[in-house]
Amino acid sequence: MSDTLSPRSADEVREAVQWAAAEEQPLEVLGTGSKRALGRPVQAAHVLDLSALSGIMLYEPAELVISALAGTPLAEIEAALDAHNQELAFDPIDYGALLGHAPGAGTVGGMIGANLAGSKRLKFGAARDHILGMEAVSGRGEIFKSGGRVVKNVTGYDLPRTLTGSWGTLAVATRITLKVQPRAETEATFVISGLNPREATQAMTAAMGSSAEVSAAAHLPPEIATVLSAHGHALSGAATLLQLEGFASSVDYRFAALKALLQGGGTISRLEAEASRALWRDVRDCRAFAGTDELVWRISVAPTAGADFIARVQAAFACRAYCDWSGGLVWLAVSGEDPQADAVRAAVAGVGGGHAMLVRAPAPLRTAVAVFQPQPEALAALSARIKAQFDPHGVLNPGRMGS
C-alpha cells in the first residue's frame, strides 16, 4: 500500500481505513496540510490525503444551508456564500499567516476537525454550533451519517458536535452540512484609545452587556497596536475595539449608544466598513505574531479574567499578549526555546481555569510538551471511552492530541 492514500469518495475512504485497521497501520488524516503543525506530530507512516474529496454538493441560499465534501477549500465555500451575500457567522480563523502558509489554504474538514471560530465567537459560537449534519468513516472502517439539512433535525445522538474539535482522531469526515446566515449590510468598529487592560475589560464587559449588539470585542496593548499599524491600520497607542454590524442606520444608532455609555474613558474614534473588516481579519488571524520566531499560545479563560491572566504571565516571564473575545481569548507570544508551559498553565489555574494550547512551536517541542490542556481524570476517562468506540484500533491521527 502506498505511503499516501488519496480517496475520491466515501467508499474509498472506508476501504482505506478498513485496510489500516486490519493491518494495524496508523493514518495521518490531512486535507491540504495547512494545520499539520497544530497539535502533537502524528505518529503514522501513511497519509490519508482528502484533498481530492472536494466540491460543494448542495447549496440552497433560500434555506441557508450548504453541504460540501471534506476536502473542499474553505475559500471556495466562502466565495460561493459571498456571491449570495451570505457568510459563516462564526467567521473561522485562518491560521495561514501564523503558521507560515498562504492564507485561504484550509478545508471545511479541517475547520470542523479543529472547531474553528473567529473574533465573533461570543455572539455566534464556533463551528460546532453551526454544523447540521455529517457523513464520516469511523476508525472501524464504517460509514455513518448523523444530523441532516435542517436546524431542528433530531436523528439520534448529536455525533457531528462530538466529532467537531476531535482533530481527526475519532472519524474521518467525508461530507459536512452547515447552516449559514445573511451577511450584514455594513459594519464599523468603535475604537477607544488609551485604556489599560483592566479599564479595557470594564469597557468591553459593559459594551457586550448593553443593547448595542456588539459582534466582537478585543483589546490591543500599545506594542500590539504598533505592529498592526505597520500593516496599515489606523491605530495609535492601546486600542480597545468593538465591532458593530447590521444596517447602516442601526450601526450609526448603536455607535452613538456606545459613545454615551463609554464616554470619559479614553479617546473615541470610528473605523468604517473596509478598514473595520481588514482590522478584524488581522486580529482574528493573529497577524501581530506572524513571521516571528516566537512560540505562540492560545488561551481561553473567562472574559473577565483575560487581563488578570496577562498580568500574571508577564510578571513571570517576558512575553507579548493581547485579548480577543472580550477578554476570553488571549494570544500569547513567548521568545526563546522555552514555552513556559508550567507558568502558563499555573496562570490559567490562578484565574479560575481555562484551556491553554501551544499553537506554534517546532515539532520536537510539540512532542515534548502537552500541546493541549491536560484533562481532569474523569474527563480523560470519558474521552478514552469515546475514542475506543469510534477508533478501537487507534489508527486515526495517533498522538495528535497526546494519546
Image (tube, helix red, strand yellow):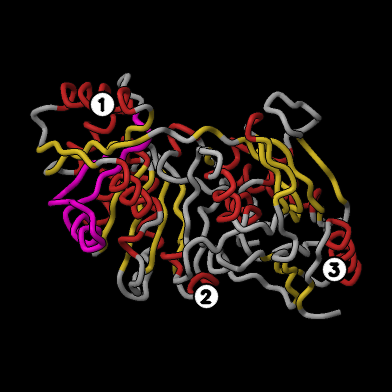
In the foreground, 215 or 84: 84
* Residue 22 in sight in this render: yes
Q: In the rendered structure, which disc, 2 or 3, sits on the residue that comes first in sequence?
A: 3
Q: Which residues are magenta?
A: 214-241
**Callout 1 environment at 10 Å: few (<14), some (14 to 19), or many (20+)?**
some
Q: Which residue is under mark 3?
A: 20
Amino acid at pointer 2: Ala
Amino acid at pointer 1: Asp
**Callout 2 environment at 10 Å: few (<14), some (14 to 19), or many (20+)?**
few
Question: x and y percent of residue 344 in the render?
Answer: 37, 56
Q: Tell me the quarter of the picture where residue 210 sits.
A: top left
Q: Which residue is under mark 2?
A: 363
Q: Circle 3 sits in a helix, a strand or a loop, which is it? A: helix
Q: Tell me the quarter of the picture where residue 11 sits.
A: bottom right
Residue at horizontal 47%, vertical 75%? Answer: 362
**Furthest-front residue in view?**
83
Q: Is residue 11 magenta?
A: no
Drawn side of residue 366 relative to residue 393, left or right: left
Q: Which residue is under mark 1?
A: 252
Question: x and y percent of residue 279 in the render?
Answer: 31, 50
Q: Tell me the quarter of the picture where residue 162 sits.
A: top right
Residue at horizontal 11%, vertical 32%? Answer: 265
Drawn side of residue 359 relative to residue 286, left or right: right
* Residue 316 in sight in this render: no
Q: Circle 1 sits in a helix, a strand or a loop, which is it? A: helix
In the foreground, 86 or 23: 86
Question: x and y percent of residue 129 in the render?
Answer: 59, 35
Q: In the rendered structure, which disc, 1 or 2, sits on the residue that comes first in sequence?
A: 1
Amino acid at pointer 3: Ala
